[in-house]
């Protein structure tokens, strides 16, 4: 079979890494998004809005697989509508849909709407009758780093209590790229980083590699932090750089 992949959310944190992995492996693909391609994007680009469905049928036409990375955490209901649109567009040619979920969220989904929507998307896809693969990943190093930066106020770091298994986004992107060539396998084992780190250890390593020490101020689990504090440690496929290695590589 000739492989020709559509990557939704290609301008996003994960989408950019998947595009790089696909390009590096010489795989034919098009990135897609609701705007024009960002300067320097490697690969073809098609405009398609997964929420309105505009441009989606044309973008999906003749694809062997859709790697669906588009998402809007701030509007969880939109992810459900968007996935239904992707499924509708894929149905004409029974296209394989590869969906990225989040690992360890079952409990957290009871209190955090985005995770609830993620699980609902998995259910909808599994019941769609289309060939599908679901890969759940732990929070990415880059996501955790951004989060900690946002919670830094001068010499203080506000920190929610959590235990995370931060994972190297390149490892996730390469796994997704490989799966786009496999036969659809349904729900796969979760992917996560080499260490499970509680708040203390996570931030110790972050201070050591990057920021210099800050005074930690415990913060309550509110808003989107409810999701992170309720995440459960998972088992499955561990790989990629550890948190401390990643922090050292991204020292500034
Ligand atoms: N971040 C993590 O740590 C993590 C961990 C595990 C799993 N995941 C999952 O991985 C996926 C990608 O996450 P991410 O962190 O890469 O997200 P992100 O950086 O916020 O990227 C989301 C992408 O979705 C696109 N998008 C949003 N609405 C769209 C629409 N209506 N039509 C077309 N494209 C649209 C955005 O494009 P625009 O440029 O147009 O906004 C952007 O490219 C999500 O499903 C997330 O749940 C994330």
Image: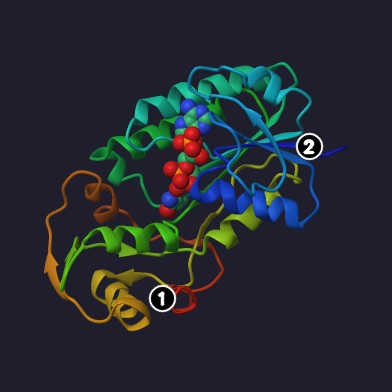
Q: Which residue is mark 1?
A: 252
Q: Is residue 178 visible?
A: no
Q: Secondary structure at mark 2?
A: loop
Q: Quadrant of residue 223?
A: top left
Q: Quadrant of residue 154?
A: bottom left
Relative to 239, say whether 65 is above or below.
above
* Residue projecting furthest to the right: 1
Q: Residue at x 60, y 17 (%)?
A: 88
Q: Mark 1 touching mark 2, by CB under 8 A?
A: no
Q: In the image, 15: left or right of 27? A: left
Colour logic: rainbow
Q: Distance of mark 1 from mark 2, alpha carbons?
A: 38 Å
Residue for point 24% across, 75% down:
200
Residue 116's x, y, as percent?
Answer: 34, 35
Q: Is residue 81 shown left or right of residue 75?
A: right
Q: Which mark is residue 4?
A: 2
Mark identifier at residue 59: none
Q: Quadrant of residue 39?
A: top right
Total labels drawn:
2
1 or 2: tag closer to the N-terminus: 2
Q: Position of residue 31 (x, y in %)?
A: 65, 38
Residue 208: where, in percent of width, then height? 33, 83
Q: Nearer the viewer, residue 176 or 158?
A: 158
Please state which of residues 175 and 40 is positioned toward the viewer in this rendering: 40
Tag 1 secondary structure: loop
Residue 204 visible in rendering: yes
Specify whether 219 is left or right of 37: left
Say which quadrant the N terminus sits in.
top right
Identify the residue at image location x=74%, y=40%. Answer: 29
Taking 26 as reference, is 65 left or right? left
Quick one: quadrant of the C terminus? bottom left
């Amino acid at each position: 079979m000739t492989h020709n992949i559509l990557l939704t959310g290609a301008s996003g944190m994960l989408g950019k890494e998947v595009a790089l992995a696909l390009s590096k492996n010489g795989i034919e693909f098009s990135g897609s998004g609701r705007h024009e391609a960002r300067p320097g994007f490697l690969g073809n680009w098609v405009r398609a809005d997964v929420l309105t469905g505009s441009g989606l049928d044309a973008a999906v036409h003749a694809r062997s697989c859709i790697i669906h990375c588009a998402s809007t955490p701030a509007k969880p209901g939109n992810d459900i509508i968007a996935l239904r649109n992707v499924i509708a567009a894929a149905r004409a040619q029974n296209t394989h849909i590869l969906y990225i979920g989040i690992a360890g969220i079952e409990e957290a989904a009871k209190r955090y709407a985005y995770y609830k929507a993620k699980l609902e998307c998995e259910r909808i896809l599994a019941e769609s009758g289309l060939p599908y693969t679901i890969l759940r990943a732990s929070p990415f190093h880059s996501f955790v780093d951004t989060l900690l930066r946002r919670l830094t106020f001068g010499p203080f770091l506000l920190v929610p209590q959590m235990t995370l298994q931060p994972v190297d986004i390149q490892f996730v992107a390469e796994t997704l790229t490989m799966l786009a060539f496999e036969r659809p396998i349904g729900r796969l084992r979760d992917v996560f980083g080499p260490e499970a780190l509680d708040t203390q250890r996570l931030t110790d390593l972050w201070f050591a590699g990057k920021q210099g020490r800050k005074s930690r101020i415990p913060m309550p689990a509110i808003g989107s932090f409810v999701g992170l504090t309720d995440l459960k440690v998972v088992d499955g496929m561990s790989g990629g750089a550890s948190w401390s290695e990643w922090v050292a590589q991204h020292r500034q």
